[in-house]
Image: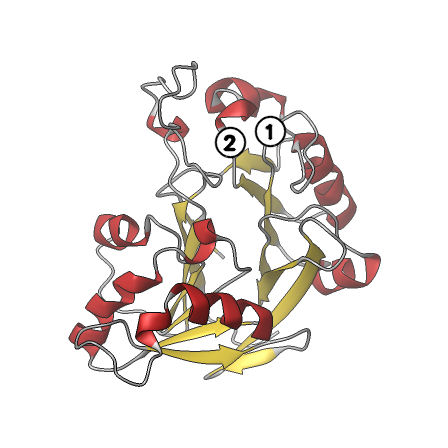
Amino acid sequence: MGSDSKMLVTFLGTGTSQGVPVIACNCPVCTSTDPHDHRLRSSILIETGGLQFVIDCGPDFRQQMLREKIQSIDAILITHGHKDHLGGLDDVRAFNYILQRPTAVYATKEVQKDIRRDYAYAFGDHRYPGVPEMYLHTYGKRPFYIQLQRIIPIRAVHFAENQYVYGFRFNDFTYLTDVFRISDEEKEKIRGSKVIVVNALRKKPHYSHMNLEEALSLLDDLKPEKAFLTHISHQMGLQAEVEKELPDYVRFAYDGLKIEI
């Protein structure tokens, strides 16, 4: 599966598209004083083999980079084209200036269209000085490499049958977000992962994301040693209470959590 070096995963954000707390919401979760209930938009940092990868670059990207004191990134991998997963790409400007190079962004051809549309000013013929510099790389269903790191894309249905979201497997670690349904063929790419991260939006069913029951069912099928839930909304309930209901090997991720694999 690629490099055998140790891997450190940092959860930059574990919230859904609105984050937690939600603007103008006074529910028990949004008013909780427990920092585990405060969630920026979902993203992770993977450090392995001397490289640093960020998966998804949402509107909280700047805040996440500052909080974790990130000085350099080698690539950003985008799971799909929704704003809560690519809305922070303008802030790669800081890395452009410090590292003196464009930021490598990996996305499907379809998502690259979204990036070029949303950040048209960064790709025009006459660009304003200081706009973000991104070098877009294409991935599809096949494994690809960034330097020596092998990465396996995992395609899942997000909403309609033709609206896909991609997860990624790095060695014995798999990260999935915004999954609604996943085929048996794609599950086989995950099987054998020691650690799996998967989205669980809330307890009630949802039209485009797995709920808690569906996420736990997927994990029961795949049987990792450890699993973490992410992309969590305020409708899930207080982490300290709901976590008591989880199997021993499953925990809610929280912002700032670090796991070594």
Circle 1 SS class:
loop
Left or right, 87 with respect to 144, comes to left
Residue found at the far right of this picture: 184
Left or right, 237 with respect to 140, comes to left
- Work out whether mark 1 precedes mark 2 in sequence or the reverse, and give the earlier one: 1
**How far across and down, in percent of the image, does residue 213 sit?**
71, 31
Q: What is the number of callouts on the image? A: 2
**How far across and down, in percent of the image, does residue 45 sit?**
40, 58
Asked if residue 194 can be seen in this view, the reply is yes
Pointer 2 local density, CA inside 10 Å: few below 14, some 14–19, many at least 20:
many
- Residue corresponding to mark 1: 202
Left or right, 167 with respect to 4, comes to right
Identify whether 36 is placed above or below 218.
Answer: above
- Amino acid type, residue under disc 1 in the picture: Arg
Which residue lies at the image location 60% right of the left edge and 46% below the top edge?
198
- Image quadrant in which you'd find residue 126: bottom left
Asked if residue 172 can be seen in this view, the reply is no
Near-viewer residue (124 or 59) = 124
Quick check: marks 1 and 2 in contact, CB under 8 Å? yes
Q: Find residue 248 and name its label.
A: none
Which residue lies at the image location 17% right of the left edge and 77% below the top edge?
129
- Amino acid type, residue under disc 2 in the picture: Ser
Pointer 1 local density, CA inside 10 Å: few below 14, some 14–19, many at least 20:
some
- Measured Cα–Cα span from mark 1 to mark 2: 6 Å
- Residue corresponding to mark 2: 233
